[in-house]
Image (cartoon, rainbow, N blue to C red):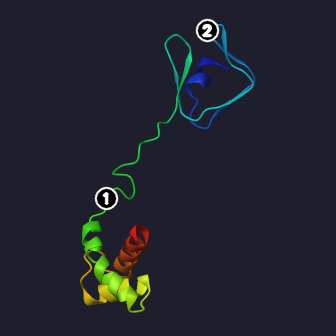
């Protein structure tokens, strides 16, 4: 492999066989390049892999803006359940009354959130 070939390696390129750089064996068999390959001034190859970025924002479930408001509705949910409603049915009734807080425009999203929290904590 010539010096020009070494500098033209790109992500996804493969090197077959054995390659020597500056008199030293650096790769044997087959190497798949997954990052950027840089030929340094000393004639050695340096593979720089792609760094995985950490996820942005808080972890899922860490922010629950309406948990306190939903918990305040638990006594009313218990009353509705005692009258024969299911947990989901009680949550849907409270949403229909307009007393469940939330930014969602879909009423079933609010009811689902309230019912899940009720089942989880009761």
**Above or below, 51 relative to 44:** below
Quadrant of residue 91 in the image?
bottom left
Say which of marks 2 and 1 sits in front.
1
Q: Residues within 10 Å of mark 1 (few under 14, many from 20)?
A: few
Residue lying at 73% horizontally and 19% vertically, measured from the top left: 18
Q: Which mark is residue 63?
A: 1
> Which residue is depicted at the point 33% across and 51% down?
57
Q: In which quarter of the image is the C terminus?
A: bottom left
Which labelled disc corresponds to residue 22? 2
In percent of width and height, residue 84 lies at 42, 92
Image height of 57 relative to 24, above or below: below
Give how far across and how far down residue 49 sits, in percent.
Answer: 52, 32
Q: Which quadrant of the view contains residue 16?
A: top right
For the point 36% across and 49% down, the residue is 56
- Residue 113, image x, y percentages: 37, 73
Q: Who is closer to the viewer here, 68 or 60?
A: 68
Q: How crowded is mark 2: few (under 14 residues within 10 Å), some or many (20 or more)?
A: few
Determine whether the residue tagged by mark 1 lies in a helix, strand or loop. loop
Q: Position of residue 101 (x, y in %)?
A: 25, 76
Lateral position of residue 3 relative to residue 111, left or right? right
> Foreground: 19 or 119?
119
Considering depth in this image, is 99 or 84 the residue closer to the camera? 84
Q: In this view, does 34 lie above or below 27?
A: below
Residue 44's quadrant in the figure? top right
Q: Which residue is depicted at the point 42% across and 72% down?
A: 116
Q: How many marks?
A: 2
């Amino acid at each position: 492999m010539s010096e020009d070939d070494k500098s033209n390696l790109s992500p996804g390129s493969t090197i077959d066989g054995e390659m020597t750089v500056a008199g030293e064996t650096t790769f044997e068999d087959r190497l798949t390049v997954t990052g950027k390959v840089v030929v340094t001034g000393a004639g050695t190859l340096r593979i720089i892999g792609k760094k995985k970025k950490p996820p942005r924002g808080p972890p899922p479930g860490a922010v629950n803006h309406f948990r306190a408001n939903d918990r305040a509705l638990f006594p009313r949910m218990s009353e509705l359940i005692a009258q024969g409603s299911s947990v989901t049915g009680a949550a849907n009734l409270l949403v229909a009354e307009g007393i469940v807080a939330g930014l969602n425009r879909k009423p079933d999203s609010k009811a689902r959130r309230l019912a899940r929290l009720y089942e989880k904590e009761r």
